[in-house]
Image (cartoon, rainbow, N blue to C red):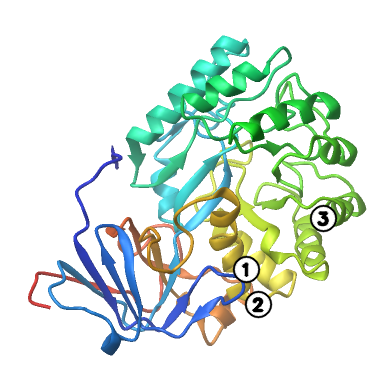
């Protein structure tokens, strides 16, 4: 279901009986709290129930001992318009991804639009239109930050200034257009940064006709804010080159579902060895040739936790707080003032793991029992994950 981006206010929401509260903060991934209070879509308080003002709630959610995590953020998607993707001619992919716990998506370029304009006037018009359209319309309640122009030869500083003034805050993947040389890309990335537009660079072999190889030297010279799909999209650079990028660059390390899984593990381990796990963020790079991945972010969390031998609570931060901080978003962390975007999870039925975190570290994805965006319940038991062992219960009315 898609709806306008300004839904009715959530009023006062109280969440009680939280069994495990994941913060999204990589420096403190688990909070000692069992209650969250939300006022008008923002987190107002986090703590023990006895210490929180839970009176006069419009909605109460009994978490029933399940885990609450910040809404997952997909740092790398390719939307077009609405909840349709021409890449696989599929409807409802964003709503379906919300059922995988994703509450925010970041566009890396609306590259799959049929007849996508590549002239400078046209690409600017597309970016502004996409930004406006998704700002006004949220499929499944998901916040889609779109309007990410693919840069082309001939663009000047004035073009970036005009885009920023129009509300564009992102660049599509550098390298998907005609600008592929490091020196040329670096100048445009610098212009974008000057006007507050964040950039991402394509890393690895070509993914669609018109794209090309972007090697480690181009990535380093261009110095984009995010090393997009560092594990390839789909084809990766050599593992040694990826590890070199982790070491020589200070930019965000984006690992995606639609890339090379072996290199994804190596990149995550390199970030840990370099003591910079705060730089790691996760995306799907979908829709793509491999389809739509509603559970792509959860699958990446389970993959990295189990195969890279990383604590599950840490990897959840890659998909929440890390991305929020790097992307400058008011979500992704459980703390007062942040958007009330939550995923309620429990261990999947019949997993070998004793707890939710154990199950993820064994490679199983959890079951989702509920998704909340801006304090409003968007789905109950997920139609896409395996069934959760326990699910939360909603009670409405001011008598609680």
In the rendered view, tell whether residue 211 sits above or below residue 56. above
Q: Residue at x 44, y 69 (%)?
A: 334
Please name whichever residue, 40 or 384, is drawn nearer the observer in this view of the structure. 40
SS for dot 3: helix
Q: Which mark is residue 311?
A: 2
Q: Residues within 10 Å of mark 1 (few under 14, many from 20)?
A: many
Screen quadrant of the N terminus: top left
Q: Quick check: marks 2 and 3 in contact, CB under 8 Å?
A: no
Q: Position of residue 355 (x, y in %)?
A: 51, 84
**Badge number at residue 246:** 3
Q: In what element is the residue under mark 1?
A: helix
Q: Residue at x 57, y 26 (%)?
A: 112
Q: Which mark is residue 280?
A: none
Label 1: which residue?
315
Front: mark 2 or 3:
3
Q: Is residue 17 above or below residue 257?
A: below
Q: Nearer the viewer, mark 3 or mark 1?
A: 3
- Are the residues at dot 1 and dot 2 in contact (C-beta closer than 8 Å)? yes
Q: Is residue 365 visible?
A: yes
Q: Residue at x 35, y 61 (%)?
A: 340
Residue 56: give x, y in percent of width and height. Answer: 12, 73
Say which of 285 and 174 sits in front: 174
Distance between mark 1 and mark 2 Cα atoms? 7 Å
Q: Quadrant of the C terminus?
A: bottom left
Q: Quadrant of residue 289?
A: top right
Q: Report crowding for label 3: few under 14, some 14 to 19, many 20 or more residues within 10 A (C-alpha).
A: many
* Horizontal side of residue 248 vs 390, given as left or right: right
Query: Which sits earlier in the primary sequence, circle 2 or circle 3?
Result: 3
Compared across the picture, whether 118 is left or right of 342 comes to right
């Amino acid at each position: 279901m898609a709806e306008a981006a300004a839904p009715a206010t959530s009023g006062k929401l109280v969440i009680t009986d939280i069994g495990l509260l994941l913060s999204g903060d990589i420096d403190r991934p688990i909070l000692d709290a069992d209650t969250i209070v939300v006022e008008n879509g923002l987190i107002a308080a986090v703590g023990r129930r006895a210490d929180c003002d839970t009176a006069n709630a419009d909605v109460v959610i009994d978490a029933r001992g399940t885990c609450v995590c910040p809404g997952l953020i997909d740092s790398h998607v390719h939307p077009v318009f609405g909840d349709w993707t021409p890449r696989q001619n599929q409807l409802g992919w964003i709503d379906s991804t919300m059922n995988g716990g994703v509450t925010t998506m970041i566009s890396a370029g609306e590259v799959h639009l049929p007849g996508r304009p590549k002239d400078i006037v046209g690409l600017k018009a597309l970016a502004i239109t996409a930004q406006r359209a998704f700002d006004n319309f949220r499929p499944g309640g998901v916040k889609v930050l779109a309007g990410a122009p693919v840069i082309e030869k001939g663009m000047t500083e004035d073009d970036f200034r005009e885009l920023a003034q129009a509300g564009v805050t992102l660049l599509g993947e550098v390298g998907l257009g005609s600008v592929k040389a490091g020196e040329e890309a670096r100048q445009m990335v610098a212009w974008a940064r000057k006007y507050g537009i964040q950039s991402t660079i394509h890393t690895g072999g070509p993914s669609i006709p018109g794209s090309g190889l972007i090697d480690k030297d181009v990535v380093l010279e261009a110095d984009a804010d995010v090393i997009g799909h560092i594990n390839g999209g789909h084809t990766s650079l050599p593992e040694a080159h990826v590890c070199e990028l982790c070491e020589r660059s200070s930019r965000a390390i984006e690992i995606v579902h639609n890339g090379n899984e072996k290199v994804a593990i190596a990149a995550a381990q390199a970030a840990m060895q370099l003591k910079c796990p705060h730089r790691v963020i996760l995306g799907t790079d979908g829709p793509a040739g491999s389809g739509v991945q509603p559970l792509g972010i959860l699958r990446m969390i389970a993959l990295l936790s189990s195969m890279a031998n990383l604590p599950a609570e840490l990897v959840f931060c890659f998909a929440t707080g890390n991305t929020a901080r790097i992307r400058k978003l008011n979500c992704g962390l459980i703390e007062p003032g942040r958007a009330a975007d939550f995923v309620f999870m429990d261990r999947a039925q019949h997993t070998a793991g004793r707890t939710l975190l154990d199950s993820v570290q064994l490679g199983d994805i959890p079951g989702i029992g509920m998704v909340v965006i801006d304090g409003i319940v968007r789905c109950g038991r997920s139609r896409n994950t395996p069934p959760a062992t326990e699910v939360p219960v909603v009670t409405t009315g001011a008598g609680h």
